[in-house]
Amino acid sequence: MRRIILAALAMLLLFGCSQAPKLGAIDSAHEHADFKVYVNNVAFNFSQGKYMEEIPTSITCSQSTTLAHLHDMDGDVVHKHATGVTWGYFFSALNMSFDDSCFVTDTGEKYCNGENAKWRFYVNRAEVGWIANREMHNLEKVLITYNATNEEIARQLDTITDKARRQNTSEVCGATS
């Protein structure tokens, strides 16, 4: 009986548990993604100093010490500097969190899926499931929205910028590959 229980636990660990994404070394990637977060049809303002990583002019963006960040007071583009970086990881770097149904801001405001409101996620205009464990990819356009109608979502999708493409070709924090 003990062997059966141990075997069952081993199988559960091997096949039943999701593993945390494996983060690559800093500079194992250099990619950019456009994104917007809306709560109750109001865009969250990520273009605030508290969300920015300062990149001194004396160093290049690839010398950043974080795996994902915002900078230059531009809250529309995430800069990713390692493979395996997820959207959940990025938000945790901003002192925000996702769990299986809630998003908690850096000020402690909590927005959870419920009977009257829910989170919806779009990548390149296609709706996807919960995004916290999804790895960021170069030139993605991501919408994260809470409590929005389909009409509001259509308008929100149109507000996502194309700045990531310009960042990839820019000499200031552009792509290294």
Image (cartoon, rainbow, N blue to C red):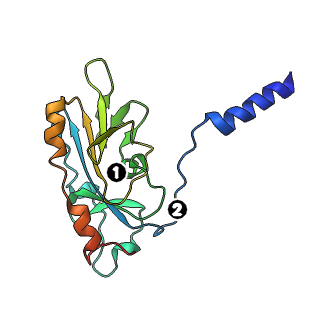
Question: Residue 111 lies in what quarter of the image?
Answer: top left
Q: Which of 177 and 13 is in front in this view?
A: 177
- Residue furthest out toward the bottom: 58
Residue named by callout 1: 94
Image point (43%, 35%), residue name: 99
The amino acid type found where label 2 is placed reads Gly
Which x, y percent locates residue 79? Answer: 33, 62
**Relative to residue 106, is residue 163 depicted above or below?**
below
The amino acid type found where label 1 is placed reads Leu
Q: Do the residues bearing badges 2 and 1 touch, measured as CB atoms within 8 Å? A: no
Which x, y percent locates residue 80? Answer: 38, 61
Q: Which of marks 2 and 1 is nearer the N terminus?
A: 2
Which x, y percent locates residue 127? Answer: 31, 38
Q: Residues within 10 Å of mark 1 (few under 14, many from 20)?
A: some
Question: Residue 146 lies in what quarter of the image?
Answer: top left
Which x, y percent locates residue 45? Answer: 19, 48
Q: Nearer the viewer, residue 127 or 113?
A: 127
Image point (41%, 63%), residue name: 66
Question: Is residue 27 toward the left or the right of residue 114 in the image?
Answer: right
Name the disc covering residue 24, or none.
2
**Relative to residue 114, is residue 164 depicted above or below?**
below
Quadrant where the C terminus is found in the figure: bottom left
Name the disc covering residue 9, or none.
none
Q: Which circle, 2 or 1, is nearer the viewer? A: 2
Q: How far apart are marks 2 and 1 (CA)?
A: 19 Å
